[in-house]
Amino acid sequence: MLLLAAPLRLAALALLAASPAVSQPVELPQRRPGYWEIRMMTGGGPGGQEFTLQTCTDAATERQMVEYGFGQMGRTCQRFDIRRDGEDYVIETDCLIGQTRTTARSVISGDLRQAYSLRVEGTIQTIGQSEFQQTLTTQQGRFVSARCGGGLRPGDILLPGGQRLNIRDLAASNAPAEGARRP
């Protein structure tokens, strides 16, 4: 599960950054409020895992995710660059999370109003070890409806197997420490 958690963390941090960036030279588009379906593939190739998530968002949730994501990046990343490459947005990171160093290059395509794709290629290396793991995570998000069904409230993510978590609650319980730097 640890090997799966790190690529998911890379993808989640990249997605959290996929909203307007106040202090960044590049402003990323904001996801349209409502009900989204996100197909995710981790690992790539025959050993990869594919699953689908449902999520509900609104403008306040998108802002909170950006603040949470920037707080996480500010505490753990030595590098956090966002730039425009044609129609795509590219995010490059180099982060230290505990004893694990992760580097990633994320590419966000699409308008985030109707659909988007996210590709995160990276490496994971335990400090003091020469071996590293290559990672690949992709997401295909599509807007389903302006109204969230199934009892989902803004911030809810419905995982495979019916487990539900709320990103707003997660962000509130892991609020960035005072003085956390913003990229």
Image (cartoon, grey):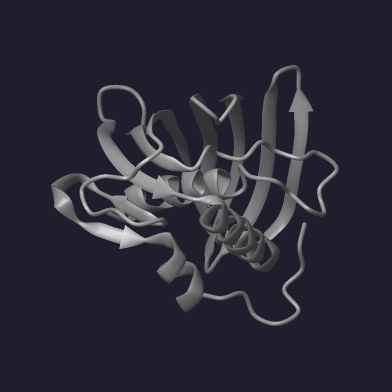
**Residue that appears at 34% across and 56% down:** 156
Work out whether residue 101 or residue 79 is closer to the camera in this orientation and state it. 79
Identity of the residue drawn at 43% across and 61% down: 167
Image: 113 above or below 152? above
| Residue 88 visible in this rendered orientation of the protein | yes
Quadrant location of residue 137?
Answer: top left
Q: Residue furthest left?
A: 161
As drawn, 8 above or below 140: below
The residue lying at 61 percent from left, 42 percent from top is: 18
Q: Position of residue 51 (x, y in %)?
A: 25, 35
How many marks do you count on the picture?
0
Left or right, 56 with respect to 46, comes to right
The image quadrant that residue 105 belongs to is top right
Residue 43 image offset from top left, x and y in percent: 36, 33
Please indicate, yes or no, whether residue 42 appears anywhere in the rendered image.
Answer: no
Q: Quadrant of the C terminus?
A: bottom right
**Residue at coordinates 46% horizontally, 77% vertically from top-left?**
173
Residue lying at the far right of the rendered structure: 25
Q: Residue furthest bottom?
A: 178
Residue that extends furthest to the front in the rendered view of this protein: 147
Residue 149 spot, x, y in % from top left: 25, 45
Q: Quadrant of the N terminus?
A: bottom left
Residue 86 position in % (x across, y down): 75, 17
Judge left or right: residue 19 versus residue 46.
Answer: right
